[in-house]
Amino acid sequence: MTVETIFGAPPAPQPEAREAITIRRPDDWHVHLRDGDMLASVLPFTAAQFRRGIVMPNLVPPVTTSAMAAAYRERILAARAEECDFEPLMTCYLTDATSPDDIERGWAEGIWVAAKLYPAGATTNSHSGVTDIAALAPVLERMERIGMKLLVHGETTDPQVDIFDREAVFMESEMLPLLARHQGLRIVVEHATTAETLDIVRAHAGRAAATITPHHLVINRTSIFQGGLRPHLYCLPIAKRERHRLALRKAATSGEACFFIGTDTAPHPRLRKEAECCAAGVFVGASALQCYVQVFDEEGALDKFEAFASLNGARFYGLPLNEGTITLHRRPGRMPKAVPVAGDEVVIFRGGEDLPWSLGEIRP
Ligand code: NCD
Ligand code: ZN
């Protein structure tokens, strides 16, 4: 059973519907590129879709210093194909020991554009994350002063809290106090998954924003259990009820400046997904724009697609808009099932399906 059969066939295109859409080249404001063989295998997919990417620092060991970020950036650049113009934007993995001076040094030297806050233990490779957000105040005050963005994985790590409530609890117990304590800090709530999170972001628009993944627009929590357990749909934050999926679709397609792309493409080898304990993460790097544009099409909001894909994020980060364009065609294309990686493979979100939209020309 495919994701499409879970939600029924997409509505038939309207007679006046556009057969292609050309937008300014988009960016991915949340991407896990990994390292080594995995980096080499997945980078071409992200680079074929996006001009820039905010690269997540949750490697093993995590990217906690400006020197590590600079070295990681070089490895990404070296993994690019010759003609590839993909630009990695680096982030700092915050820990209890992060120094405000190193944060500022990496910022001043142009090594990183943001810092990522993982509550310790919240998700894949977050064990060295932050145990006490309030104690991070000196780092956050420095970021506020220099204008460096804070990116937050917004889930509580309290094991007593139901996994489907972890984002909601975090938003109330940590995010609202954080927003109150640091009123000049610009915060991206990463991979928002609940209607309430979207409302909190809207209420703080201008200094808060949210990324929305393709998969959270397409699946709900029942999809993960459709006909059996589907490990390749398991990610964190976990998909929520249908009402949240509908709220995410409404927000993404609204044109509101506080919402933008962040695919959270998070590849894991099939062996780590189809395992006794399945790793969290969905590899959506190969099908992201096709999924997003289909959602905008279904919602009758193709005119809002460029804002979500290519304008809102750059503006929030204070970065220039991309110059070139990419065209997407309403032309069915078969998504490959998986990508080979060093003797294993990574299963693609909606891989094996005929997606109604296909990637077209890029003009740099
Ligand atoms: C991400 C990963 O695999 O690195 N996994 C995920 O489920 N999204 C980490 C993250 O962003 O939470
Ligand atoms: Zn992520």
Image (cartoon, rainbow, N blue to C red):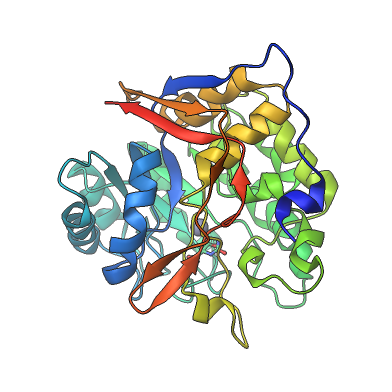
Name the residue rendered at 70%, 57% in the picture.
167
Q: Vertically, is 362 above or below 291?
A: above
Q: Is residue 359 left or right of residue 220?
A: left
Q: x, y percentage for residue 117?
A: 48, 58
Which quadrant is home to the N terminus? bottom right
Q: x, y percentage for residue 13?
A: 72, 24
Q: x, y percentage for residue 317?
A: 41, 33
Residue closer to the observer: 195 or 149: 195
Residue 166 falls in image quadrant: bottom right
Which quadrant is home to the C terminus? top left
Residue closer to the observer: 164 or 120: 164
Residue closer to the observer: 295 or 235: 295
Name the residue rendered at 43%, 69% in the picture.
96
Residue 218 in view (yes/no): yes
Name the residue rendered at 33%, 36% in the picture.
51
Residue 61 falls in image quadrant: bottom left
Q: Is residue 336 left or right of residue 12?
A: left
Q: x, y percentage for residue 107?
A: 26, 45
Name the residue rendered at 48%, 71% in the picture.
126
Number of callouts: 0
| Residue extending farthest top | 16
Residue 203 in view (yes/no): no
Q: Vertically, is 24 above or below 106?
A: above
Residue closer to the observer: 115 or 3: 3
